[in-house]
Image: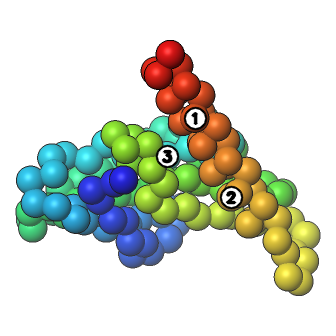
């Protein structure tokens, strides 16, 4: 369970921005990880605001993510290994009622669950 909640504020000029809020006082500084196709995204910034327990998260979309197909970004609380938010880019042929983005998100979350389950099994042996 994460002690943080992430809310998208905008997506402009290739940068996804959100407001990270602590659910519990004195929860400590957040550790955010962002992945694309199970690889870390570089350049993510987490900046503390003037209000306690609030941070601005900025995620630049890498050039390699821009192209045909569906690209799903997962934003994780690295300490809790929990998905806080996600966003998807779809480019190329646009289809009505396209479910590819949902399938891609499900695959990414399933991969995360598999890793967590394997880690749990190793730790309990």
For label 3, the SS is strand
- Crowding near the residue tagged with mark 2, few <14, some 14–19, many ≥20 C-alpha atoms within 10 Å: some
For label 1, the SS is helix
- Crowding near the residue tagged with mark 3, few <14, some 14–19, many ≥20 C-alpha atoms within 10 Å: many
Q: Earlier in the sequence, mark 2 or mark 1?
A: 2
Q: Position of residue 47 (x, y in %)?
A: 23, 53
Q: Which-is-in-front pick, marks 3 and 1?
A: 1
Marks 2 and 1 close (CB-CB < 8 Å): no
In the picture shown, does residue 76 fall above or below 40? below
In the picture shown, does residue 59 fall above or below 102? above
Q: Which-is-in-front pick, marks 2 and 3?
A: 2
* Quadrant position of residue 73: bottom right
Would you name the residue on which mark 3 appears?
Answer: 34
Q: Is residue 63 at least partly visible in the picture?
A: no
Most extreme residue toward the top, as rendered?
A: 125
- Crowding near the residue tagged with mark 1, few <14, some 14–19, many ≥20 C-alpha atoms within 10 Å: few
Q: Is residue 21 left or right of residue 17?
A: left
Q: Position of residue 2 (x, y in %)?
A: 34, 54
For label 2, the SS is helix
Q: Position of residue 79 (x, y in %)?
A: 34, 40
Q: Which-is-in-front pick, marks 2 and 1?
A: 1
Most extreme residue toward the bottom, as rendered?
A: 96
Q: Is residue 58 at least partly visible in the picture?
A: yes
Q: Which mark is residue 117?
A: 1
């Amino acid at each position: 369970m994460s002690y943080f909640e992430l809310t998208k504020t905008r997506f402009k000029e290739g940068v996804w921005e959100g407001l990270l809020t602590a659910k519990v006082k004195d929860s400590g500084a957040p550790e955010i990880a962002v992945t694309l196709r199970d690889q870390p995204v570089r350049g993510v910034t987490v900046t503390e605001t003037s209000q306690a327990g609030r941070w601005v998260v900025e995620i630049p979309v890498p050039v390699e993510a821009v192209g045909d197909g569906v690209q799903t970004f997962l934003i994780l609380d690295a300490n809790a290994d929990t998905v806080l938010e996600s966003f998807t880019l779809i480019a190329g042929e646009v289809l009505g009622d396209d479910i590819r983005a949902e399938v891609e998100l499900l695959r990414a979350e399933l991969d995360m669950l598999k890793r967590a389950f394997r880690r749990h099994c190793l730790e309990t042996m």
